[in-house]
Amino acid sequence: MSIEARLNELGIVLPVAPAAVAAYRPWARTGNLVITSGQLPWKDGRMAYTGRLGDAVDVEQGYQAARQCALNAMAQLKDAVGNLDLVTQIVRLEGYVHCAPGFRGHPDVLNGASHLFAQVFGERDRHSRLALGISDMPLDAAVQLTVIAEVASVP
């Protein structure tokens, strides 16, 4: 099944790939790797989830924020290669959770991204993952996610 068909089956419509908010590119490609810049939980042109986990944001909201970051990362991958069927493996997710002191639920939050990638990419999702908590985040975003994906060479 194609990735587009899988997205349709799941009822998922990818957003437009968010533009960079500073002096960087939203993604870079080197050889068969595409690396996204940090993806924030943008939805419909606004930051959908702001604040610190363990304070203003609960774990379920954090999970949804990570899921939105993953949707934006998929949109960046599609922008980079034109067709998500060219993604041969999701290699690594790096997640940064904006959290209050003492918060320890980083893995539960980032499962929002990991679960979505598994649903969409199936066997092509065998990623490693980094989960870090940080005290401040650009634009007060609740979560930030970077994705490294292996892609097929285009003839």
Image (cartoon, helix red, strand yellow):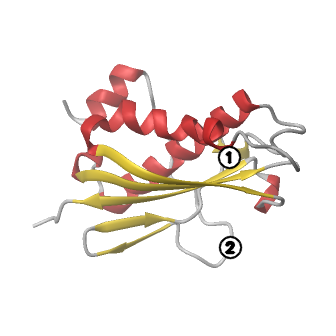
Residue under the point 36% across and 34% down:
120
Q: Which image quadrant: the C terminus?
A: bottom left
Of pointers 2 and 1, the one earlier in the residue sequence: 2
Residue 37, x across and y down, in percent: 54, 65
SS under mark 1: loop
SS under mark 2: loop
Q: Quadrant of residue 96?
A: bottom right
Q: Is residue 20 above or below residue 74?
A: below
Q: State the residue position of label 1.
A: 45
Residue 106, x across and y down, in percent: 67, 44
Q: Mark 2–mark 1 contact, CB under 8 Å?
A: no
Give the number of the mark in front: 2 or 1: 2
Q: Is residue 8 above or below residue 100?
A: above
Residue 19, x across and y down, in percent: 58, 61
Residue 97, x across and y down, in percent: 71, 50
Callout count: 2
Q: Is residue 35 above or below residue 91?
A: below
Q: Quadrant of residue 4?
A: top left
Residue 117 appears left or right of 85:
right
Please tell me which residue lies in front, 33 or 139. 33
How crowded is the residue under tag 2: few (<14 C-alpha within 10 Å), some, or many (20+)? few
How crowded is the residue under tag 1: few (<14 C-alpha within 10 Å), some, or many (20+)? few
Q: Is residue 143 above or below residue 152?
A: above
Q: Amino acid at mark 1?
A: Gly
Residue 115 appears left or right of 23:
left
Please tell me which residue lies in front, 141 or 112. 112
Q: State the residue position of label 2.
A: 22
Residue under the point 52% across and 40% down:
113
Q: Amino acid at mark 2?
A: Ala
Q: CA distance from mark 2 to mark 1?
A: 16 Å
The label on residue 76 is none
Q: Which image quadrant: the N terminus?
A: top left
